[in-house]
């Protein structure tokens, strides 16, 4: 073998090994690896924290069972969602939504019924911090940002997810919470735009206003 060729190969070999090593070191880890298991463990831990810190003041937690399940054991009102004991111990963390109080609602604030619409501020993210939807950027400033109007009723193709409907029917106007929704009460096993299947959804959610349908008397469902 030509000596010059031999030395060229000897020189290039460690460089090629170095390139491979660098490529391996800089490989980007899949942020959604073991996603379902990670989300299941996450919501279990949130449920444990919430159950140990129940209350009605800032920093405390509230737990409300899926309104569809709750209806089976309660006397339905107009909204059909009055739960006799919303803090009941549940067999599965995926049966309920978990709300950490950021701001307490107005003393005389309205609480929406199933037939109502609401105006809200919100930001939604995944357990890895990825923001998938929001109607404000930066810190919430109600003098600048505009709330979004939603109808609570879920009998429409583009209706709200069960987790939102459940939570909102227990919130008062002016209340702001950090809302944790298990995948089963969100989009379940289906991918939804930038939201992978089996995702826990975390929302910074503020109920700005309750809007009753035309022709319905203005009243509030009191949540004591």
Image: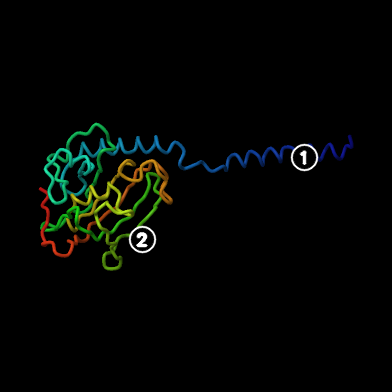
Q: Quadrant of the N terminus?
A: top right
Q: Is there a contact, CB below 8 Å, between mark 2 and mark 1? A: no
- The residue lying at 35 percent from left, 57 percent from top is 134
Residue 31 on image: x %, y %: 47, 43
- Residue 182 lies left or right of residue 208; in this view the side is right
- Of 51 and 18, nearer the camera is 51
Of the residues tagged 2 and 1, which is closer to the observer?
Answer: 2
- Residue 28 lies left or right of residue 136; in this view the side is right
Q: CA distance from mark 2 to mark 1?
A: 53 Å
- Of 122 and 49, nearer the camera is 122
- The residue lying at 27 percent from left, 36 percent from top is 93
Residue 198 on image: x %, y %: 38, 41
Residue 18 on image: x %, y %: 67, 39
Dot 1 surroundings within 10 Å: few (below 14), some, or many (20 or more)?
few
Numbered label attached to residue 11: 1
Residue 117 figure quarter: bottom left
- The residue lying at 30 percent from left, 35 percent from top is 44
Task: Say above or below: 204 vs 67.
Answer: below
Q: Which residue is mark 2?
A: 137
Residue 51 figure quarter: top left
**SS for dot 2:** loop
Q: Tell which circle, 2 or 1, labels the residue nearer the N-terminal end.
A: 1
Residue lying at the far top in this picture: please name it.
Answer: 91
Dot 2 surroundings within 10 Å: few (below 14), some, or many (20 or more)?
few
Residue 52 figure quarter: top left
């Amino acid at each position: 073998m030509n000596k010059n060729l031999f030395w060229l190969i000897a020189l290039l070999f460690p460089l090629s090994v170095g390139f491979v090593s660098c490529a391996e070191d800089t490989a980007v880890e899949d942020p959604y690896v073991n996603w379902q298991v990670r989300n299941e463990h996450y919501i279990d831990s949130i449920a444990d924290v919430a159950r140990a810190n129940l209350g009605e003041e800032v920093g405390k937690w509230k737990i409300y069972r899926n309104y569809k399940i709750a209806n089976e054991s309660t006397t339905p009102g107009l909204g059909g969602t009055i739960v006799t004991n919303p803090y009941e111990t549940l067999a599965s963390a995926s049966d309920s939504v978990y709300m950490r109080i950021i701001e307490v609602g107005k003393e005389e604030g309205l609480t929406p019924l199933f037939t109502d619409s609401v105006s809200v501020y919100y930001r939604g993210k995944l357990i890895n911090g990825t923001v998938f939807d929001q109607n404000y950027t930066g810190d919430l400033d109600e003098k600048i940002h505009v709330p979004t109007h939603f109808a609570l009723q879920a009998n429409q193709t583009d209706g709200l997810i069960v987790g939102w409907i459940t939570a909102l029917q227990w919130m008062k106007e002016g209340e702001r919470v950090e809302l944790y929704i298990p995948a089963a009460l969100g989009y379940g096993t289906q991918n939804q735009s930038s939201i992978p299947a089996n995702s826990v959804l975390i929302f910074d959610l503020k109920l700005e206003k309750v809007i009753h349908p035309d022709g319905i008397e203005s009243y509030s469902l009191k949540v004591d």
